[in-house]
Image (tube, grey):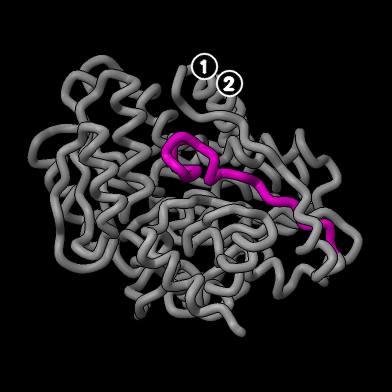
Amino acid sequence: MLYLITKDRKWWAGNRKYARPNVQYAKSNTSLENRYEEFEMADLVENILAADARIKTIDGGPRETPLDLAGPFSEQTGAQVVLKGEHLQPTGSFKLRGAMNKMLSLNDDQRAQGVITASSGNHGMATTLAASLAGVTATVYLPESVSSLKRTNIERMGAKTVLVPGAGVECERAGRRAAADQGVTFVSPYSDLDIIAGQGTIGAELERQCPDLAAVYVCVGGGGLISGIGSYLKVKRPGVDIVGCWPANATAMHGCIEKGEIWDVPETDTLSDGSAGGIEEGAITFPICQQVIDRHVMVAEEEIAEAMRETAAKERYIIEGAAGVAVAAALKTGGDYAGKPVATIICGRNVSMEVFMGVMAGAKT
């Protein structure tokens, strides 16, 4: 049984019920429920700190990324907008942190058997590189809609790929079934404490880099990134607002939190393909997101595109749609933190040139 100890409530994920009234899982997943031992939120913070020390010892692995002031965005919002450059990681996104921590957490038998994962792209690339650095073979299950750039990069780094019809959640189900059938480790894109701890190392860096941080804007897909950052900062800097950001076309975790259970939230196409897709049954990120997210901000597709254009024009960064979601949300609501530092997670840069040029061509004249 897993539980999270918080200031005012205890939640049981293993029993599929929480202390919050009327909250329960829509479906059960016994394999997930039995995966984790009891832990307190403080233990997750300790795991994050251990991951922070561990993953950065690997040559070619994750690195501490800069936190840079964005002058034009600060002028626009009145807040001190700082950009956390996760797009500068070796695979072009934050995902390498969690994947590297997972590979280093495997035992010898698990490493020898190899791993299977599922991803819309960035986690697949990260797992492939992390596995290569750790001497582990990897197979990546991808939705058929994955960008050609991401699939090509994954295969170039040495992983086998398997395409699956449907959205990301179907891809995860297929990958998990294959891993169970083959008796190998499945590396979840988000629903794994080792993955969450790896992503949470961003929170540790933010604490060191900006002790007076007022808020952090994070694009939310499966919730692994915001679960890690939020868990760390809620313990170490409880006054920091954790702002969850979604494209209005794809709000799976937001919809689950609103309803109080995991369900298939309808989604449509979005520039933020890296955050699109449903939430897996029994996902450990669900109760964590319920606890750590303070604010929910939705942005329209044109707001995402404009954020991508503005970031390219004013910061000279090429960013993908998911990063554009966080920037757009910060530009939309950053004025609520006038005069205070707010961090925006630039989570990735892996956008195809075709899509990026299409976004640029849509600039207002």
Taking the view exactly as shown, the residue that stands out farthest to the bottom is 365
Instruction: State the extent of the magenta-drawn residues as a range.
Output: 79-96
Vertical placement of residue 330 versus 173, above or below = below
> SS of the residue at dot 1?
loop
Seen from the viewer's position, the closer of residues 338 and 102 is: 338
Q: Residue at x 65, y 59 (%)?
A: 217
Quarter of the figure that contains the C terminus: bottom right
Image spot of residue 259 (x, y percent): 47, 77
Looking at the picture, which amino acid does disc 1 mark?
Answer: Thr
Looking at the picture, which amino acid does disc 2 mark?
Answer: Ala
What number is the disc on residue 57?
A: 1
Asked if the magenta segment contains residue 84, the reply would be yes
Asked if the magenta segment contains residue 6, the reply would be no
> SS of the residue at dot 2?
helix
Judged left or right of residue 361, residue 159 is left
Image spot of residue 59 (x, y percent): 46, 17
Quarter of the figure that contains the N terminus: top left
Return the residue at label 2. Answer: 53
Write down the quadrant of residue 112 in the picture. top left
Image spot of residue 156 (x, y percent): 23, 37
Taking the view exactly as shown, the residue that stands out farthest to the right is 339
Discs 2, 1 touching: Cβ within 8 Å? yes
Image spot of residue 215 (x, y percent): 75, 57
